[in-house]
Amino acid sequence: MPTMDIARKLDTVVTADPDTSIRDIAKKMSEKAVGSVVIHRNEEPVGIVTDRDIALKVVGGDKDPAAVTASEVMTNDPVTIDANAGVAELCEKMREGSVRRMPVTENGKLVGIVTLDDLVVLLDSEMNDLSEIIKAESPPY
């Protein structure tokens, strides 16, 4: 299964440019109920800001969210996955990169995002399908 089959599409990805203030990033997160914002330049993901980045680097660092920009706290060069890569490769890259959120790209351009939550939902669905097979093939209890 290609990663893009489980990814959130570009029109739902919350994005900003590197010069966006952390205050504005936090407002976007709150409005969209997300935990991360993909930072892009010319449609290419160049960073990611998470709610944890804001809590630890800005609030915990006693910095003014209106004066700090995304480029100052973002994770640069985020680990990305090609839209056509398989879910197994996605899981491996997430594990190797120790990340919970991964921008999805096509020809280097942002086309979506996939999160650990998306993988858990997929796993739940797959496990349900497998349990239905087992139930159908097992004698009644």
Image: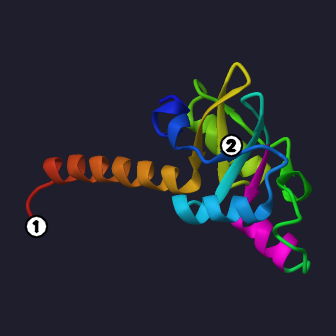
- Viewed as shown, does residue 103 lie left or right of 118? right
Quick one: quadrant of the C terminus? bottom left
Farthest residue toward the left?
Answer: 140
- Distance CA(mark 1)–CA(mark 2): 39 Å
The residue under the point 11% across, 56% down is 139
Q: Dot 2 surroundings within 10 Å: few (below 14), some, or many (20 or more)?
A: few
Give 30 or 123, whichever is nearer the viewer. 30
Q: Please state the extent of the stretch shown in magenta in the rendering.
A: 47-59
Q: What residue type is labelled 2?
A: Glu
The residue under the point 79% across, 66% down is 53
- Is 10 a magenta residue? no
The residue under the point 74% across, 24% down is 108
Marked residue nearer the N-terminal end (1 or 2): 2
Which numbered circle lies on residue 26?
none
Q: What residue type is labelled 1?
A: Tyr
Residue ID for mark 1: 141
Predominant SS along the magenta part: helix
Q: Residue 43 falls in which quadrant of the image?
A: top right
| Above or below: residue 22 compared with residue 127 | below
The residue under the point 57% across, 60% down is 34
Q: Position of residue 128 (x, y in %)?
A: 30, 53
| Above or below: residue 61 compared with residue 24 | below
